[in-house]
Image (tube, helix red, strand yellow):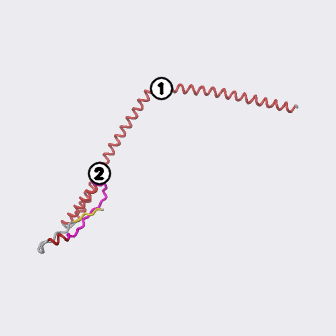
Amino acid sequence: MVSGELEQSLRGAVDEYISSRLRGLQEEITRLQGQVNEAFTQLAERAGGEGDADASVAASISEHIRAAHSRGIEDAVAESARTRASSDIAILKAGIEDLSEQHSQAEILSTLVNRAASKALSATTGYASYRCRSRPTRPSATLSARASPGAARPAATPRIICS
């Protein structure tokens, strides 16, 4: 029986030790919870009092963002105008070079018509990658048959083909 009493005594001592440690931890947890609740209460009171200051800071930040956005738009518009101007100059130079390569009035006229057609297509479709060329068509058979034998035949009308 001595061993049973010793076991119960030992079990009681261990339970008492664990209970005392747990009581200490529970008291510490309760104290910390009170401090956290008090800190949150103080924070909520300060946040309620600083609502006006936060609104002015938010308005100031919003105004800075709007100003930066406006400056960005203005910069983009200016850059776009510069790019468009340089692109127009490059197109003009290419057109002049293309015309200077032509040797006859017909070739010059054909080049001008092709460029005008290309420009018209790009303006209506929004695509600037059209390449136009003219291809002469044969006079229609009905026109040839109606013409008198001594009259000059009608010239072939150019047909503009864009791709």
- Which residue has dot 1 on it? 48
Q: Is residue 15 left or right of residue 25?
A: right
Query: Of helix, strand and loop, which one carries label 2?
Result: helix
**Residue at x 34% of width, y 41% of height:** 71
Question: Position of 18 compared to 30: left or right?
Answer: right
Instruction: Please state which of the two labelled residues, at mark 2 or mark 1, is closer to the viewer.
Output: 1
**Which of the two discs, 2 and 1, labels the residue nearer the N terminus?**
1
- Is residue 153 depicted above or below 61 in this figure? below
Residue at the disc numbered 2: 84
Q: Nearer the viewer, residue 126 or 139?
A: 139
Name the spot of residue 136 as percent of width and height, x first: 23, 68
Along the viewing direction, whichever of 91 and 149 lies nearer the viewer: 149
The range drawn in magenta is: 123-140
Within the image, what quadrant is residue 4 found in? top right
Looking at the picture, does residue 27 appear above or below residue 103?
above
- Residue 87, position in %: x, y? 29, 54
Taking the image as shown, residue 7 lies to the left or right of residue 135, namely right
Amino acid type at mark 2: Arg
Crowd band around label 1 with a 10 angstrom C-alpha radius: few (<14), some (14–19), many (20+): few
